[in-house]
Image (cartoon, grey):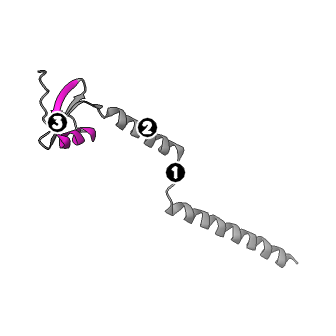
Amino acid sequence: MTGLRVSVILEASRQAAEAAALSVRATEGSVMFSPVIGQNSKRAAVRKALDRHKVYITAQSFSAGTYQARVLVDGEAYWVDEFRLSQLQQGLSPAELELVPATDD
């Protein structure tokens, strides 16, 4: 009878070892998502949104098939075409686009 008891103990140990090996294999290939990583990515998205300047369209002009908009960016007014307006809205600064502030008429 002692031989039977030993084999039952060995079988249970073997099953536990196989379960542990499966558990290790499952975590090796997968990326674990932690609350800290999620919080950091949310903070980064908020920081990016706050760093981007606001673009306010204060006037629009459609003349001879061309579009112009007077925009207010960081307290300064600029006249821009449709392409420059989209670049400003994507986050480029007026300095990067080499825009000249609008003169008031």
C-alpha separation, residue under disc 2 versus residue under disc 1 = 16 Å
- Residue 99 in the image: state x and y as whole percent: 13, 33
Q: On residue 44, which mark appears?
A: none
User: In the displayed image of the protein, which residue is found farthest to the right?
Assistant: 1
In this rendering, would 69 be left or right of 3?
A: left
- Residue 67 in the image: state x and y as whole percent: 17, 40
**Residue at numbered disc 1:** 33
Tell which circle, 1 or 3, labels the residue nearer the N-terminal end.
Answer: 1
Q: Secondary structure at mark 3?
A: strand
Residue at x 50% of width, y 63% of height: 29
**Residue at numbered disc 2:** 43
- Vertical position of residue 34 compared to residue 50: above or below: below
Q: Amino acid at mark 1?
A: Phe
- In the image, the segment drawn in magenta is 76-91
Residue nearest the viewer, comparing 94 with 17: 94
Q: Amino acid at mark 3?
A: Val
Q: Secondary structure at mark 2?
A: helix
Residue at x 79% of width, y 74% of height: 8
Image quadrant in which you'd find residue 61: top left
Crowd around label 3: few <14 · some 14–19 · many ≥20 (10 Å)? some
**Residue at numbered disc 3:** 80
Residue nearest the viewer, comparing 16 with 105: 105
Q: Secondary structure at mark 1?
A: loop
Tell which circle, 2 or 3, labels the residue nearer the N-terminal end.
Answer: 2
Residue 95 visible in the displayed image: no
Which mark is nearer the camera, 2 or 3?
3
Q: Amino acid at mark 2?
A: Arg
- Vertical position of residue 52 compared to residue 37: above or below: above
Residue nearest the viewer, comparing 29 with 40: 40
Callout 2 touching callout 3 (CB < 8 Å): no
